[in-house]
Image (cartoon, helix red, strand yellow):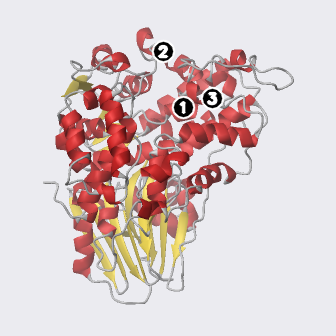
């Protein structure tokens, strides 16, 4: 929806408007429809607007409550704002617009910042109390909308993107080596650090308060996922019917907009189900698909192009279908731009997302996304079955940590990093960060296969999913496009957490049978199981064609394993193995050389690690060396 920026000088120095504007201009791409500023003594708030609800000037920000007690900047969309508005009207509050921002202003006027906990939607909010001189920052339950901050003891800066914060003259850029260690462990950052030293991401479902006496930012979590309270008496039919009802409700809720809404359409069940429901809400829904030139793809990647299945569904639902076909050479053009916009490096090959959101932005301002269904309903069974037979908590941690070291295991960190970097990092820190994801929630138990699987769901929805949200937000907003996620509706999520594992994984009982009654493990040969999302699959059967419902699960990815060996091999070597490579200040050149050689010449699949090496190389070029991406 927008981009927000703020500066709060705790030492009571006056905020310089031009300085605030310069910071906000760094994220102008997030809000091409307008801008606004609130500067009062030592507080400054800025807003770049992407107009979605009430596109008139009445919806402009920063916005103040009628009493002028609160001034708010907000990024996101609140899907239950109409119901909350009626409640506030009954309490005597008056409204001048049809925007959700005004509901937030009057809501915190009526109830205080606890009102944030009642919002069903995605949001990053900054609310300034003009009476108490306190600043409140808050993020939505699931962490869909990003919000970063930097605090040096006298000044707090916050923004939707880091590039706005580092524009502040007091910020001096440096690499957070702890975050770098995490990234090359998990291809993600499970803590809330970033590669930018001192810049922190506000955790999801957190509201923090800062005033002139603050010496640090204290995180205050007000909600968490809970897969421990499943309803084991729930029948499969009940689970299926309620999932179907809540899913339709969620898609309908998220169609709310005063601008055109479209949907991404892969060849899969999740996006197809969203398209099925959304296509009934408008005369003709616009859908968008990314395909790939498969002429050089080999092995399992030869089936990565999903256009045929997407076209089948587009024809079935009578959508207006648009397609982007990518080839191997597209990575060279897009990678610098992608890294600049992403800035906070996360997860795997995401440049197809950059292209598909660029395509969608030419036709719509809002696009529905299928992300979240896998994490809620058990879409990755081959992951869970690696740990479901753990005998105890310690073994569960050992097995799952081994799996989630997606890039470089701890044993190879000394070879990965240069000596100067390795001497400064704590090799054991990623393991502690990993375990803290679980120990944050004292409800988790580690005694049964079902508990292990639910713990896996908890972990992935707390770590992997936020990485997907981050990538989705940054790359869509790079083109002034808002992505929405119907699976991440409060009511649907609350119900999905209560659905028993036995309804999510179709082969669970067969897998449990592989464990002896005396808890001595039998050998289990793992493969790519296709029994995930069982109840969701059955619930969606009324919406989409059978051949899509029964289709083998496939992620959204380009055939990079093949491309890195073929047409892109020269680009990989040019970027990572030349005298102009700059990331070798941090990453050992011999380790990069070995990785590239093994992938290109020896048949070892290092596509994830090569992607991360290339991302970090461009990150260093852009943010440390100041190279232009134009």
Residue occupied by mark 1: 246
Disc 1 versus disc 3: distance between alpha carbons? 31 Å
**Which residue occupies the foreground of this view, 128 or 95?**
128
**Which residue occupies the foreground of this view, 575 or 189?**
575
Rendered image quadrant of residue 254: top left
**Which residue occupies the foreground of this view, 236 or 383?**
383
| Badge number at residue 542 | 2
Q: Residue furthest right?
A: 518
Above or below 495: residue 48: below
Disc 2 versus disc 1: distance between alpha carbons? 14 Å
249 left or right of 297 in image: right
| Element class at badge 2 | helix
Q: Is residue 93 visible?
A: no
> What x and y, as percent, mark residue 606?
38, 34
Above or below 560: residue 40: below
Give the mark nearer the N terminus: 3 vs 2: 3
| Element class at badge 1 | helix
Q: Are marks 3 and 2 in contact (CB under 8 Å)?
A: no
Residue occupied by mark 3: 386
| Element class at badge 3 | loop
> What x and y, as percent, mark residue 592?
34, 45
Dot in front, 1 or 3? 3
Q: Residue at x 22, y 24 (%)?
A: 320
Q: Residue at x 21, y 33 (%)?
A: 568
Dot 2 alpha-carbon crowd within 10 angstroms: few under 14, some 14 to 19, many 20 or more: few
Dot 3 alpha-carbon crowd within 10 angstroms: few under 14, some 14 to 19, many 20 or more: some
């Amino acid at each position: 929806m927008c981009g927000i920026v703020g500066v709060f000088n705790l030492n009571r120095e006056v905020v310089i408007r031009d300085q605030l504007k310069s910071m906000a201009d760094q994220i102008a791409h997030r809000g091409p429809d307008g801008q606004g500023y609130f500067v009062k003594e030592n507080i400054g708030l800025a807003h770049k607007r992407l107009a979605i609800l009430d596109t008139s000037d009445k919806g402009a920000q920063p916005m103040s409550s009628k009493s002028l007690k609160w001034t708010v900047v907000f990024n996101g969309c609140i899907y239950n704002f109409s119901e909350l508005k009626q409640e506030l009207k009954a309490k005597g509050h008056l409204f001048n617009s049809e925007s959700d921002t005004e509901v937030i202003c009057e809501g915190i006027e009526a109830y205080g910042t606890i009102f944030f906990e009642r919002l069903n939607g995605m949001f990053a909010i900054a609310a300034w109390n003009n009476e108490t001189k306190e600043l409140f920052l808050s993020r939505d339950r699931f962490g869909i909308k990003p919000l970063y901050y930097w605090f040096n003891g006298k000044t707090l800066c916050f923004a939707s993107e880091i590039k706005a914060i580092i524009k502040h003259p007091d910020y001096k850029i440096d690499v957070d080596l702890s975050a770098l260690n995490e990234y090359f462990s998990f291809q993600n950052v499970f803590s809330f650090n970033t590669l930018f030293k001192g810049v922190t991401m506000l955790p999801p479902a957190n509201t923090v308060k800062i005033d002139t006496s603050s010496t640090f930012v204290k995180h205050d979590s007000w909600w968490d996922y809970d897969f421990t309270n499943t309803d084991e008496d729930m029948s499969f039919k009940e689970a299926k019917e309620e999932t179907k009802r809540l899913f339709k409700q969620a898609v309908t809720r998220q169609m709310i907009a005063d601008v055109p809404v479209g949907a991404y359409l892969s060849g899969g069940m999740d996006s197809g189900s969203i398209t099925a429901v959304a296509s009934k809400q408008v005369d003709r829904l616009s859908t968008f698909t990314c395909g790939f030139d498969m002429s050089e793809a080999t092995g399992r990647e030869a089936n990565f192009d999903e256009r045929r299945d997407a076209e089948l569904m587009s024809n079935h639902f009578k959508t207006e279908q648009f397609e982007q076909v990518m080839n191997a050479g597209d990575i060279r053009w897009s990678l610098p731009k992608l890294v600049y916009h992403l800035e906070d490096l996360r997860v795997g090959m995401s440049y197809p997302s950059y292209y598909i959101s660029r395509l969608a932005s030419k036709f719509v301002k809002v696009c529905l996304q299928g992300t979240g269904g896998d994490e809620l309903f058990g879409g990755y069974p081959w992951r869970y079955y690696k740990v479901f037979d753990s005998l105890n908590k310690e073994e569960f941690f050992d097995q799952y940590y081994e799996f989630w070291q997606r890039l470089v295991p701890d044993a190879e960190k000394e070879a990965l990093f240069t000596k100067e970097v390795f001497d400064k990092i704590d090799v054991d820190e990623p393991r502690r960060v990993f375990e803290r994801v679980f120990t944050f929630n004292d409800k988790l138990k580690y005694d049964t296969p079902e508990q292990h699987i639910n713990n896996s769901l908890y972990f992935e929805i707390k770590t992997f999913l936020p990485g997907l949200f981050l990538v989705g937000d940054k790359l869509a907003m790079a083109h002034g496009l808002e992505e929405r996620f119907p699976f991440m509706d409060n009511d649907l999520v609350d119900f999905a957490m209560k659905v028993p594992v036995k309804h999510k994984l179709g082969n669970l009982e067969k897998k449990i049978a592989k464990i002896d009654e005396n808890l001595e493990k039998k050998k289990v040969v793992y493969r790519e199981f296709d029994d995930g999302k069982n109840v969701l699959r059955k619930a969606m059967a009324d919406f989409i064609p059978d051949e899509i419902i029964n289709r083998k699960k496939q992620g959204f990815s380009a055939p990079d394993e093949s491309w890195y060996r073929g047409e892109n091999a020269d680009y990989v070597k040019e970027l990572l193995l030349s005298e102009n490579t700059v990331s070798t200040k941090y990453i050992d050149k011999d380790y990069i050389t070995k990785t590239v050689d093994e992938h290109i010449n020896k048949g070892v699949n290092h596509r994830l690690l090569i992607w991360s090496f290339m991302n970090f190389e461009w990150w260093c070029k852009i943010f440390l060396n100041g190279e232009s991406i134009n």
